[in-house]
Amino acid sequence: IIMKQLTEKGYTPLFLTALQAFAGSLFYFPLLLLPSTVIPTTVEPVSAIAVVYLGCVVTFGAYGCFNFGLSRIPATQASAYVNLIPVFALVMGVVVLKESLTFQQYTACGVVFTGLFLSQQKERKPVKA
């Protein structure tokens, strides 16, 4: 709701996404100061690419697009689409990792899509006879 109000005051969705990422970084920064029992001696390229992907594509791509959509449509309508995140995670698992879905996972996806469909229906005002 605050994001919607800030976009209406003239802040760009990209700026607000960067601000969210910065605030999240500040929130987790104290965890870097905790003593660690395992200190990595090497950086694996696959791990580094994964971190860059999560930072650029997920944070700025996905949440940037969500914030842009939020600036254009009502917050109640936009927030319903956040429920698609687990569904797309399952789809990516099938496509990228060649996983197979169970009946319960297919059912859960159907429930999410049904809930999304129902939440986006316009309320009809009763017609007087």
Image (cartoon, rainbow, N blue to C red):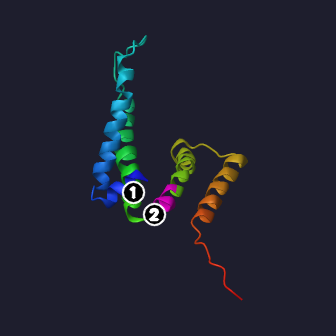
Residue occupying image coordinates x 41% and y 59%: 70
Q: Quadrant of residue 25?
A: top left
Of helix, strand and loop, which one carries label 1?
helix
The residue that appears at 38% across and 65% down in the rendered structure is 72
Look at the picture and state if 42 lies above or below 81. above
Q: Are marks 1 and 2 in contact (CB under 8 Å)?
A: yes
Q: Is residue 87 magenta?
A: no
**Visible residue check, residue 48:** no
Vertical comparison of 117 with 30: above or below? below
Q: In what quadrant of the picture does the C terminus appear?
A: bottom right
| Side of 50 relative to 113 (left or right) | left
Secondary structure at numbered mark 2: loop
Q: Residue 57 at x, y = what percent? A: 37, 46
Q: Position of residue 114 (x, y in %)?
A: 65, 61
Decide which of 70, 89 is in the foreground and name it. Answer: 70
The residue sitting at 30% across, 45% down in the picture is 18
Which residue matches tag 2?
Answer: 74
* Kind of residue sitting beneath label 1: Lys
Q: Give the main secondary structure, helix, strand or loop, of the magenta stretch.
A: helix
What segment carries the magenta color? 75-79
Foreground: 45 or 33? 33
125 versus 17 height, above or below:
below
Instruction: Provide residue 67's location: percent of width, then percent of height.
Output: 38, 54
Q: Is residue 47 left or right of residue 121?
A: left
Q: CA distance from mark 1 to mark 2?
A: 8 Å
Please identify the quarter of the rendering in which residue 7 is found. Answer: bottom left
Label for residue 4? 1
Left or right of 97: which side holds 61? Answer: left
